[in-house]
Amino acid sequence: VRIVEFESHELDIRRQRIEVDVELWDCSGDPRYRDCWPAIRDGIEGVILVANPDENKGEDLKIWYDEFIASSNLDPENVLIVLNEMGEKRTNDTAISEFRLPPQLSSATCAACNLLHEGDQLRLDFNQFLVTIIAKSEVPSDM
């Protein structure tokens, strides 16, 4: 399990620029870390699921939905699904269009990218994801 902490400086909420502390917990998609999952789930406000649409199907996300979203009563709108292609080519539109989310995740945000070529768009999608989560929580008026 890897934990990354950082400050995001590029968020605008209600026409105000805010800075937020973000913690990302990476559980690598490996079931051998299953014993750590309850600690990772504790207090989560959002979930990012990453899949390679050339290798994974939407149903492959079901285990992560069950373990992190349903068990935490998290709103699927607080889920960002990143369809990350790993090759040298740009995003494969065919693989993306054939990727079907499970019905439980139909209201999640889905961002398709190839990080080698399209990282800037993912940054924008990630920032919008943060804004969505923050807007749903109680934001102090002096921010």
Image (cartoon, helix red, strand yellow):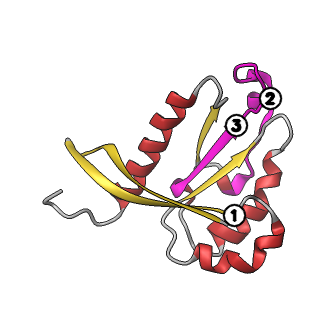
Question: Who comes first in sequence, dot 1 or dot 3?
Answer: 1
At which x and y percent is residue 63?
Answer: 78, 64
Q: How many marks?
A: 3
Q: Residue at x 31, y 45 (%)?
A: 9
Residue 66 position, x and y percent, is 72, 68
Amino acid residing under circle 3: Asn
Residue picked out by circle 3: 84
At 42% from the left and 43% from the top, the residue drawn is 127
Residue at screen point 70% across, 24% down? 91
Pointer 1 or 2: first along the chain: 1
Q: Is residue 1 visible?
A: yes
* Range drawn in magenta: 77-104
**Mark 3 vs mark 2: which is more N-terminal?**
3
Left or right of 118? Residue 96 is: right
Q: Decide if residue 88 is on the left or right side of residue 13.
A: right
**Given the current orientation, which residue lies at the most extreme left position?**
142
Which mark, by number, is residue 27? 1
Query: Which class describes the residues within 10 Å of circle 1: few (<14), some (14-19), or many (20+)?
Result: some
Density class for disc 3 (Cα within 10 Å; few <14, some 14-19, many ≥20) is: many
As shown in the figure, which amino acid type bears the numbered disc 2? Answer: Ala
SS class of the residue under badge 2? Answer: helix
Question: Looking at the rendering, which quadrant does residue 11 occupy?
Answer: top left
Say which residue label 2 marks.
95
Residue placed farthest to the right in the image? 55
- The answer to whether one can see residue 14 in this image is no
Compare residues 11 and 104 and report the one nearer the observer: 11
Mark 3 element type = strand
